Image: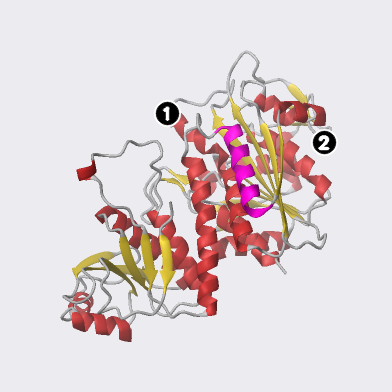
Amino acid sequence: MNPTISFGRVSLSAYKAPLLAVALGDDADLSDEVRELDGAMGGAISRAKDSRDFRGARDETLWLSGSAKGPRMVLLVGLGAVSDRTGALRRAAAIASRQANKLGVSEMTWHGGDLNEREIEAVVLGLSAGAWDYTETKTLPPENERRAQLSAVSIAAADSAAGQRGLANGLALAEGHSLARRLAMMPGNLCTPDYLAETAREIAGRHGMEVTVWGRTEMQEEGMGSFLAVAQGTPQDPKLVVLKYDGARNGSAPIVLVGKGLCFDSGGISIKPPQNMELMKFDMCGAAGVLGALDAIGRMKLDVNVIGVIGATTNMPSGTAFKPGDVVRSHLGKYIEVVNTDAEGRMVLADLLSYVRRFNPAVTVDAATLTGAVVIALGHTATGVFSSDDALTTEVLDAGKRAGEPGWPLPLWDEYKELIKSDVADMKNAGGRAAGSTSAAMFLKEFTEGMPWIHLDIAGTAYSETDLVALPKGPTGVPVGTFVEFVRGRAS
């Protein structure tokens, strides 16, 4: 559960909060409010800066005892050399709320200087992200050993109409991120295709959206042979889920968001090595991102039409599983040679991208934890971005930058089509190790002709196997922010 967050102008030196977090840059002079607090604390903050005990570097923290009449504890958090103030504030806010949770503080006040609408939004998102934790499958410790969770935060900033908008948008984004992270963190035996479908129904109910859920029978009738090939090895019913948000209500062409929803990916017959296979519960982060984004968009009431589409199943080895050498007919009618059953996500997306053409989308954006190759190329810092439309690529990269989810463009040239050439079908589903993320994107491109489209490979950014300082290891919430910022950029 996200903490309750409010804001209003307060005297830092007199505010009786259990914890006051103050964000400072590496070369910034103390503001009037912080100087007043410093005076009440006997000059502790200025001494820490002058002695370089606290330098204001990014992610740096320093605990100080508070004043007799003010906060009991003060936490200084470094912003670093600020080139992107919005992103620096979001990160520092997340670190502050993580520290509050570790200390067992239930209430905190945050101060980061004067904040505009976007900065308040970023701080709210950071505070919520840092306080987030997944405890649903953990037994609580004995009552006398439990620490309080951060449940209330007050942002020390002047109240205004713009600030209230920033607060409302930040809370909406925070709920979308939290939903996506919770879905991703859930074990694969709990977050099933049925569970994702039910989550979509709950979102639709909250925001008055239209929802459609298809199972195996409906997809067979529709001719989704590529998607169903992946699903034929599992007894769980696969799900195609469509969420429609009519925010513009003027019949304008919708933005379509598509997400890969492999609730668990064993690799199928081309089975993965056992080490770290448990992380393959995260192979549905694209679908989680679509659901989180639609929830946030519904809360923000954006004036735009959006359709979210996810394909959910599991990829399992069994006597009925698809196998290397099989040839299947896709929804679009193109034949696919299966050379690697662990290249399953693109086969699900192929039928989804073909299916969404019926909506005549203004643009289709898909996101998927698609290839390990993109991690080799870009590590865990940037999302791989693929499109033949340079203007659309720039638009998505800008949206990701605003969201704090950076991307990097990778080539999608016709020459790479040779990598997926098949001897027995129209294409094969994997092109080998060389340019692995590009060959996967080239495969998807085969199903998008005549439709503005861009692909986000989030395999390196949707979750982390190590602690990220601002976030714990596990799901990051990517691509919720990119989706929402892209949609918001097109809202009228």
On the rendered structure, is 116 left or right of 349?
Answer: left
Amino acid marked by disc 2: Leu
Q: Residue at x 37, y 62 (%)?
A: 152
On the rendered structure, is 299 left or right of 182?
Answer: right
* 487 vs 232: above or below: below
Residue 204 in the image, given as x and y percentages of width and height: 65, 48
CA distance for labels 2 and 1? 36 Å
Q: Residue at x 80, y 51 (%)?
A: 451
Residue 402 in the image, given as x and y percentages of width and height: 56, 65
* 153 vs 222: above or below: below
Characterize the magenta stretch by its predominant secondary structure.
Answer: helix
**Residue 39 is drawn in which quadrant?**
bottom left
Which residue sits furthest top?
A: 319
- Closer to viewer: mark 2 or mark 1: 2
The reply to whether residue 30 is visible in this rendering is no
The reply to whether residue 350 is visible in this rendering is yes
* 187 vs 474: above or below: above
Range drawn in magenta: 192-208
Amino acid marked by disc 1: Gln
Q: Is mark 2 on a helix, strand or loop?
A: loop
Circle 1 is placed at which residue position?
275
On the rendered structure, is 41 left or right of 467?
Answer: left
Please tell me how crowded label 2 is: few (under 14), some (14-19), or many (20+) other residues with Cα within 10 Å: some
Circle 2 is placed at which residue position?
332
